[in-house]
Every structure is written in C-alpha cells, then in structure tokens.
Amino acid sequence: MRIVLLLTFLLVSTPFFSQTEDEKQIKAIYDEALTNGKAYDWLNYLSNQIGGRLSGSVQAQHAVEYTKEQLDSLGLDKVWLQPVMVPKWVRGVPEFAYFETKPGLTTNVPICALGGSVSTPAGGLKASVVEVKGIEDLEKLGRDKIAGKIVFYNRPMDPTLINTFSAYSGCVDQRYSGAAEAGKYGAVGVIVRSMNLRLDDYPHTGSMGYGDTPVNQRIPAAAISTNGAELLSTTLKLNPDAKFYFKQNCKQLDDVQSYNVIGEITGSTYPNEIMVVGGHLDSWDLGDGSHDDGAGCVQSMDVLRLLKETGYKPKRTLRVVLFMNEENGMRGGNKYAEVARNKNEEHVFALESDSGGFTPRGFSIDASAENVEQIQGWRDLFEPYLIHMFYEGGSGADIGPLKEEGMVLAGLRPDTQRYFDHHHAENDTFEHVNKRELELGAATMASLVYLIDKYGTIPTKKIKG
Amino acid sequence: MRIVLLLTFLLVSTPFFSQTEDEKQIKAIYDEALTNGKAYDWLNYLSNQIGGRLSGSVQAQHAVEYTKEQLDSLGLDKVWLQPVMVPKWVRGVPEFAYFETKPGLTTNVPICALGGSVSTPAGGLKASVVEVKGIEDLEKLGRDKIAGKIVFYNRPMDPTLINTFSAYSGCVDQRYSGAAEAGKYGAVGVIVRSMNLRLDDYPHTGSMGYGDTPVNQRIPAAAISTNGAELLSTTLKLNPDAKFYFKQNCKQLDDVQSYNVIGEITGSTYPNEIMVVGGHLDSWDLGDGSHDDGAGCVQSMDVLRLLKETGYKPKRTLRVVLFMNEENGMRGGNKYAEVARNKNEEHVFALESDSGGFTPRGFSIDASAENVEQIQGWRDLFEPYLIHMFYEGGSGADIGPLKEEGMVLAGLRPDTQRYFDHHHAENDTFEHVNKRELELGAATMASLVYLIDKYGTIPTKKIKG
C-alpha cells in the first residue's frame, strides 16, 4: 500500500516538473484538431456516402472498407481487419401502425420494430391495449388482464435527471425485456414508448432480447414515438377498448462475416503495453448513425493522427479499434478481448467515445483509486479546454470485456442534453453534429492518451502481486 | 479591509449551516424548470408567432405586448412598460450581389446589409475589390490602392480559441468600424466576412457605425457568407481585376417610441434593494432571434416564475427587465439605468443572459473580489447541475450601464461552440434551441438569484465609504 502511494505521488507529481511541455503538447493537439481535424470529413463520408451501418449490412461492410482505407492513408505502423461473425437482423419493409377507437375510425401513429424483434403475422396484429408504466406493473395486472392483449409500456424518461443517460437507464428495461416479460402473461405484442426526452414524431429503435423464451412463443415488439405514446395514452383513457394494429416483417437471418477495424502506432519504448481508443462502427439503420457512433469512430481515428501530426511518438503501442456490432450483439468487443487474451497481450488503457459528438465535458474512469487520482491530478491541464468532469464510473460497452485489475478504462463524457433526441432514430444524422464540438472531443481524447502514455498508469495489480 | 474579510468569511461560510435547505431549494428550481418550465413555450410564440424583432418594427411592438401580457399572467407585484425612443433602421428589399471575372461572367454570392449601413446607389455599386485581413492593413495599402474600390475584410474568426466569443471579439472591429475606416482612404463600399466559424451560406448581419464620418461620405457595408468570402478570396487570387457588385436599399428612419418590459416581485424585507435579471427583447431581422436573445428573455421571465412556484419569496425586490434595442443602439439598457439613477434606486445585483440558449456552464462575474469569492463559494451547490465556471469577467451589454462600485453584475455563460453558427443570421431560429438546454439555463439563473437574495451581496463600497 505504501509503495502504491509513493508511486502515486511520484507519478502524480511528475507533471509539475514539465508542466510547460504538457501544456504545449495539449495546446498543439487542440489547435490541430480545430484547424485541420479530419473527424468531420470522415464522418461526412460515413454518414452521407454510406449511411446507417446495421451489423451484417452492405453499409457496415462499406464502412469497414472505407475506414481501413483511411487508416491506411495515415501512415500508421499496422492496419488490419479482425474477423468476427455478427448477427444479421433486417427490418424489412417500413412498419405500419394505427389505433382504432371504433371500427374503421383509425389514427396512424409512427412506430418502428425494436432490433431483434420477430415480425407480426403477415397481415399484422390487432388487439386491445393495456398500458403500464413498467415491467413491475405486469404482476399486479396478472394474466387475466394481459392475455391476448398488446402491452403498452409508457414510462417516460425522468426529465429531472441532469445526466440524460441516467434517465435512459431508468427506462430501457421496458425496451430490452418488455416483450419477454409480457409474453409470460400471454400478451400478443408490445409497444414501447421511445427512449426520448423530447416530444416528437420519431420512433427510436434499440436492442431487445427474448431471454429463454422459446422461439414459437416470442411476441413482436415495436417502439412508438413520444408524441404517439402521449396520444395513445390519452386515447386509451377516453376509449379503454381502443384497439392497436401494427405490422412489421423484420427477421433474424444467419450470422455473417464482419470485422473490427484496427490501426496501430507501435510503441517506441514499451511496445507490449497496449492502449486502445475506439468507438463502434455499426449503427442502427433508421438514421445514418452520426452521433451513435460514427462520431466516436472518427474521433478515435483522429486521436492517432493528432498525435502523429503534433510530433508525439507514443512510448506504448496505441491502437484505434472500430468495433463491429455494439448495438445488437457486442460481438466485436467480445472478439477483440478474446483475441487479446489468446495472444496474451497486455492492455494498460482503453478509452471509448460512444455518447455522441457533443461538446466534451470530461471522462468517467473505471480504474483503481490511484489511477483515478492520477487522472484527476491532470485537471488543470484540461481546464483551458473547459474539460472539468473526472469521475469514477463506467467506460464503454466495447472496451468493457478488456477489463482486468490494474487496467485503466475510461469513457469520453460529452454534454448529454440533446443525445436522446437523436439516439437510434431517423434524425441521428450528420447535420446534427457540430464540427467544433466533434473536434474538441477528439482533442480531449488525444490529450488523455498523451498523458497516460507519457506518465504511465499505476499498475496496482503487479505491485500487490 | 479586515472588516471586509470578516464579512466575506461570515457570508461565504453561511451556506454550510443550511446546506440542506439550499440544496433542496435549488433542486426544486431545477425540477420545476425541467418538468414545467415555461421558457420554451414563450420562446415558441416569440419566434414563430412574432419572429425577428428589430427595434422600431411592428414585431418588436408585438413582442412588447406579448411579454407584458405573459408577465401580467404570472401574478407578480408590478408589471409595467418603460418608454424609450429607439432608432429605426430598415433593411428594405433583399440585398443582391455578384462578382464578375469577365464582363457578363458573374457569380452570385449571399450578402446582407450591416445594421446601420447606408444604401448603395439605386442601381447598385460595382467596383474592383481589395482584400484585407483587417483595418490595420488599410494604412499599409494607402489611398492609392483603396480609393474607388470596395474593401473586402476577410479575417476569419480564430478557430483555436475555445471560447468562441473571444474569436468574435478578435474580428468584430472589421464589421463595426470597417466602413468608417475604409471610407477615409476613399473606398466606395465594404464587404465583411461574416462572423461565423462555420463555412456555410448564411450572411450574418450586426451593428456598424460611421463614427464622425459626414453623412455624405458614408459608404455602404454588407456581410458576405463565409463560403462566399472563401470563394471571393480565391477568385481574387485568380482574377485580381474581378469586380464586385452589390445593391441594398436599407435606410435609417426617425426614432420611434418603444419600451423596456419590466415585471417585479417586491422584496419582503429589503424592498429598496433591487436585483435585476434580464435579456434583450429586440433582435436582428434575418432570423427569428431565438438564441439572440429570445432565449435570454424567456429564461429571465421564468426565473421569477420558478421562484414563485417553488415557494421562495425574495427578501429583496426582484425585477425581470426585457431590454429594447440592444442590437443597434443600447437605448433600453441606457434608459433603464438613467431612470434608476433619477429615482435614486439601489441596484445590488444584475444578471443577464445574452449568449444563447445552450447548455449553461456557469457565470462570468463583474464584481469586487469579495463578491466573486462569495459566488465561487457556492460552487458545490451548482456542481450536481454541471455548472462549473465562476470567473471574473464581463456581464451583459444591457446591464452594464447600471454598474456601480459595490454592485454585483453577472452574465450566464452557456456552451459557446454553436452560437456563431446562428448569430445574427437567417438560421437563428426556434428549431435550433433545445428545450432542456434552455430550461437548464433558466434554473441556473434562478438558483444564483436565490443565493444572492438569501445571503446578500457584500457591500464593499459602503464599508469602505
């Protein structure tokens, strides 16, 4: 413990001896990002020339090829594709839905199938609706009131939570497990209020799972826009017998071959110590996936370019990893960690950007207290860039499987207020990404990578061991 | 000095004795703003039912009437209009411009007259162009190279400055004084690169002045979009003899009657100590003035409502002031201060929101060191809302004239990255304001007003006097 403390002191205090060099390097990184950043151009191509990149799609394959080609052009030491089999779910023709208060008196509402859902019968599905505020309501209602009906999950995200990801966490069980749970009570389908704090007309898709529900007992699940949910809820109060109709012909196909895209600057001094920076290359299919997570990919790519352009040669090996299939399977993240373990690679640091390309505010850090403190000790270096959050917390879904004791994982934390206006919806598009905000995120990531590389992480595990 | 220090200590330390009450009150303010805020609805009306509110326009008058009516509905102690004469500049028919590389070979570019500019001759103005990077270049070029030409000011905003207002400050002299200065060297007109960090097609207007230039020597001035400026600059490199043509028929009319709109909750204990919270009700005419400064107005209005709804009765008198004519005359701010002095009113605090309705980050504070420290002492109360900036700096143009020693002035400081994409341009419109970001700003303002009211400011002047 004392050794760790001493080590912490030495490492934390080191910046004071070379503050000016760190300040200069970080300024150079931000200047390069804001004057000559490549992230926005790359995102433009990914979003507008390729578009939504659902795992297994032609677009996802194009994105693999395009990003590999761009990494090739950066003069890195190595660029390669890491094969990974991914699930292939397809949406099929656009979904259609209405509610009916009297026979023939119908009102259309915007819905979309949830990712992984089964289709409705070919002619669609029509049934009475029971509205609930969450999975916990199912037991109170019981099979009598649910069997044969469509369950309408309508718990909104809590607007009083300042971090909108907390509001998302408080609701997303309805989307992920709503169908599996309602199916146990004999429901024939589920409609879920979109995970969106704003009232608008976009349905938001996202992953769902059936758990151990037998294939022939799986019921279809769709998201309804927040305005649609409000209207349906009001309608049900006035017309409790209103029926809901929806039709979707989505389908789960066989797994297909895909890839993680990886580029590397080999470390000059400690090539066996690996640092990863990444985002996920797949997206949902409704928008073009600019915020989720085209932004994180192009920021991560630019991290390597920013360090090269500012003349910094990492002592440790720095990899950009564009993970495939975060949205509906996590196969890419799992595969990368599996290969790393099989090759006995030592990963000391991993940083993910998967919270949108908005103005960066800081990092959440998943590491030992000593490592969290070391990063917090760099606060003053980030202050001129208005980066102020350095808190202990989760990192990112794709890098999570790499986690080992002693390793430092972190997630870039941008402003969250607008994220769920766009998340998994048709309006997650390029024009909603601001160039400077995106570039500031890339520079913030590159600055942390620089500091971690220069001062090293504190290897708690090895000292203790 | 020691008395001041002791007083500072007492005041700064007070929060610790009642932290829980402050935490509760501030949480109540944010909760109310995020669940039941009125700012967004008010802004919707101001922007979409009224629109751009140039001083002296019918829209400005409608905005006066609408906001007074809304303040009347809040059950304040007093609501009134404060008469003020304002300048009336009108744009006339849309401007038109092109450059010509050979006779008849023309390319149109988007321009708009700068606010306060004279018109071109009725048939427009055509001349050769001399490009400069700023006013300082004029002297180097001299009258020989400028007389008879159009001066094209093309210094871009510096993208490496993290606070975009600093980049604006570094360029805006071209817009404000460019015509007066170029006129001294015989220029016949000026074209100014829009104050916008983004490359796009919107020309951005804004105020300009002729100083003591005699009326008959004033030359017309227009802004060109950033894309237009880039194109013109490239064209001039390839065709130094290219001519620029522009036509505008804007005009300065006689001053007209207008109003500041004021609402008041009279203080329960110290009614003679006045706190002001405000924004400016006028805007430019190209967009609907949602960010500049509809946002600041509706946030300020909601500050009074938030305190009322959360059951807080201010000890001091709290006024919302919607100032008229910030953009091209500052008549409203000057009038308010003039009337306050004539009535011998004691203003202890003033807070302005005039930097857009984006995610709030903190405050800049124009006050004695003791008062700045007191506010910084409340940092922990704001931390849950991710408000982290409390720095000494300017406050707001409209409240500036109130400044007296001992008084505390402050400006709300939101995220600045997107502000100049919209500032004074056709795309300063309602859909670019996010509801939650706007509401967080209102809550942040109300929380500071609450703390200032509860703990009082530190009356440096009186102790010294």
Image (spheres, coloured by chain):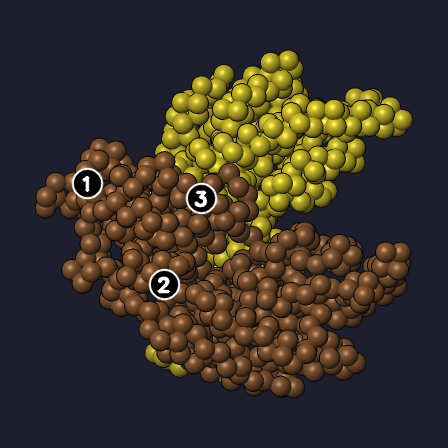
Chain colours: A yellow, B brown
Specify whether A86 is left or right of A5: left
Q: Could one spot residue A261 in this view of the protein?
A: yes
Q: Earlier in the sequence, mark 1 or mark 2?
A: 2
Specify whether A396 is left or right of A366: left
Q: Chain of mark 2?
A: B
Q: Could one spot residue B20 in this view of the protein?
A: no
Q: Position of residue B264 (x, y in %)?
A: 64, 81
Tag nearer the camera, 1 or 3: 1
Residue closer to the observer: A295 or A218: A295
Residue in the picture at 60% in, 28% down = A24
- Label 3: which residue? B157
Quarter holding the N terminus of chain B is bottom right
Q: Chain of mark 3?
A: B
Q: Position of residue A29 (x, y in %)?
A: 55, 31
Q: Give the structural element (helix, strand or loop) at label 3.
A: loop
Q: Which mark is residue B116?
A: 2
Residue in the picture at 43% in, 74% down = B86
Residue in the picture at 76% in, 59% down = B371
Q: Residue furthest top?
A: A269
Q: Earlier in the sequence, mark 1 or mark 3?
A: 3
Does mark 3 fall on the same chain as mark 1? yes
Q: Earlier in the sequence, mark 3 or mark 2?
A: 2
